[in-house]
Image: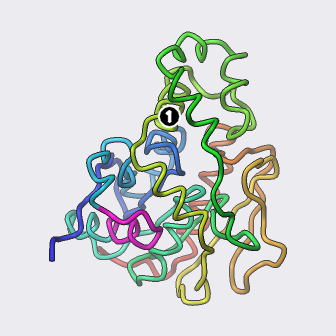
Amino acid sequence: MDPTPTLAYDRAGSGEPLVLVHPLGADRAVWEPVTEPLAAEHDVVAVDMPGFGESVELAAAVAATPEAIADTIVATLDSLGLDRAHVAGISLGGWVALELGKTGRALSVTALNPAGFWARPLGARSEGARRTAKRFHALARPFLATARGRQLALAGAVAHPERVPPAAAYRLVKAYALSPGFERANAEMRRTLFAGIEDIEVPVTLAWSDRDRLVGRPRRDPEGVRMVTLTDCGHVPTWDSPGQVTDTILSTTRAAHPPLSV
């Protein structure tokens, strides 16, 4: 059996390791607004999921389920000589973080606006918006250089598009339009639900943005899980409020006592 591939990553800081997992249709750059404050306390490893960012060559090599993506993070931890790590993720990345929590390799789990908590499987969805983005992404750079352009392009994902630098906005739109892993990961995400949160034996925080247009807080809070509201934030909250995101993640990692050496 071929070994599980490892992922592209950025690494910064020192301390207990903290893995960051981006949302569907993005890459590890979404964590840039919070990397520095997180790296003040942790060895931060921000990964690109298979088929995204600099892990694009893995689009066909790895099953696109959240469980399989979590396995690639386990393989990446092994390649870095890390036994266990804190993990945080956004949207699909939040679901992946929760799956990693079930493997016993996580020290804590923070899931920001996690996918998979809907009442029933979402089913297939038209890809019209993504086809439009793919068609026009080459023209997007000057468009996104304007505050109005970022508002039009990013309002579905970010509550305050004006806070996203033009270069970051372009990278986000390009990743959404062109990532070869998008279709398979989206289909897998929409065909099922997350289950098994009761199997996670480390601190878990689920954080929900009050201006998220894409996912919402479940009707019933899971037992034994800390629930947090991110105020005045959208689905990808790292640019909306880096402070709230940082505080939410660090308060979860600090709850994992006693600290474990790596």
Task: Decide: is 192 above or below 234.
Answer: below
Kindly identify the residue that appears in the image at 54 percent across and 17 percent down: 140
- Residue 212 falls left or right of residue 82: right
- Residue 217, by quadrant, is bottom right
Segment tinted magenta in the rendering: 62-73
Q: Is residue 22 left or right of residue 181?
A: right
The x and y percentages for residue 40 are 45, 50
Q: Position of residue 216 (x, y in %)?
A: 78, 60
Image spot of residue 131 (x, y percent):
56, 33
Q: Position of residue 108 (x, y in %)?
A: 51, 74
**Helix, strand or loop at mark 1:** helix
Residue at (59, 13) in percent of width and height: 145
Q: With respect to residue 10, does 222 lie above or below? A: below
Q: Nearer the viewer, residue 258 or 118?
A: 118
Q: Is residue 64 magenta?
A: yes
Q: Which amino acid, mark 1?
A: Ala
Reply yes or no: does residue 158 show up in magenta: no
**Residue under pointer 1:** 177
State the predominant SS element of the stretch in magenta. Answer: helix
Looking at this view, is 15 or 35 the one in front?
A: 35
Quadrant that contains the C terminus: bottom left
How many residues crowd around disc 1 within 10 Å: few (fewer than 14), some, or many (20 or more)?
many
Question: Looking at the image, which residue is at 37% across and 41% down?
Answer: 53
* Nearer the observer, 27 or 232: 27
